[in-house]
Image (cartoon, rainbow, N blue to C red):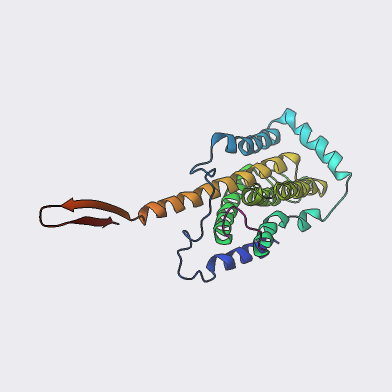
Amino acid sequence: MQSLIILFTLLTLYCPSNGKNLIRDEYKFSDSLELNPSVPNIILPSLLIAGGYIVSKVKYLNSIDRHFQDVATRIGPTGLDRYLLGAPTLSVFVLKISGFEGKNSIRTASLALVGSMAIQTALVQSLKYSTQMMRPDSSARNSFPSMHTAFAFGGAEFLRMEYWDRMPWIAIGGYLAAGTVGVARISNSKHWLSDVISGAGIGILSTKISYSLVYHVKKRNDVKNKAISVVTPYGNTKSQGISVSIFF
């Protein structure tokens, strides 16, 4: 599922654009999107990341992981983590192709998605390597954090960024799907609760950072390619007119 989404996104980015610069093509960012993520925007995902890490590392908090694991495994193995993994992300492209405009063009959204996935991968893999946490099923020491959950919640935030203003119920559905993926990872004994919590935070934070980086590139290109026109009137006893100067 992840490979399919990556392939589709890259095809979207590299398809012909009628000579337009990809970074500057059809930007429709709302005024509410800031150059840098504001503190209120990043505080929740940051707390999720930190909270999951603390639960996984502090011995007297490990009981939270074990208790939730016992409860979740009663659900039994499920394939929902595979079926719903890419649902929020694919929903964005289905809606855009179907004619339901989001906050940004499909290319701009694709660029933000690629950035989000790159940030997620870097954060998750570095933490997996450094923490060496054993999975609940003892299959490997790469449990913390959950890459599946990071991808699912990154996609849910991606969907929210594009369609919250127009279709909030769609955005809520994306987060419900991502939450189901997280629970399924625990019920399948692939992850602890702490892995899922931190994975969710990483996914959300990665998408927020990626959108801000894309916006930063857009603003920089706008300034770089901006032409300034200066119109100056002039006149004397023999002639009158205006002088137009254009600075690039």
Q: Is residue 138 visible?
A: no
User: What range is drawn magenta here?
Assistant: 99-105
Judged left or right of residue 116, residue 71 is right
Question: Foreground residue, 67 or 221?
Answer: 221
- The picture places residue 1, in percent across and down from the top left corner, at 71, 62
Question: Foreground residue, 101 or 204?
Answer: 101
- Indicate whether residue 241 is drawn in magenta: no
Residue 93 figure quarter: bottom right
Judged left or right of residue 247, residue 204 is right
- The picture places residue 161, in percent across and down from the top left corner, at 62, 48
Q: Quadrant of the C terminus?
A: bottom left
Question: Foreground residue, 67 or 97?
Answer: 97
Q: Main secondary structure of the magenta part?
A: loop
- The picture places residue 216, in percent across and down from the top left corner, at 46, 49
Question: Foreground residue, 232 or 83?
Answer: 232
Q: Is residue 239 visible?
A: yes
User: What is the number of callouts on the image?
Assistant: 0
User: Quick one: which residue is furthest to the front in this view?
Assistant: 237
Judged left or right of residue 125, residue 226 is left
- The picture places residue 82, in percent across and down from the top left corner, at 77, 57
User: Quick one: which residue is furthest to the left in this view?
Assistant: 237
Relative to 196, does residue 92 appear above or below in the rendering?
below
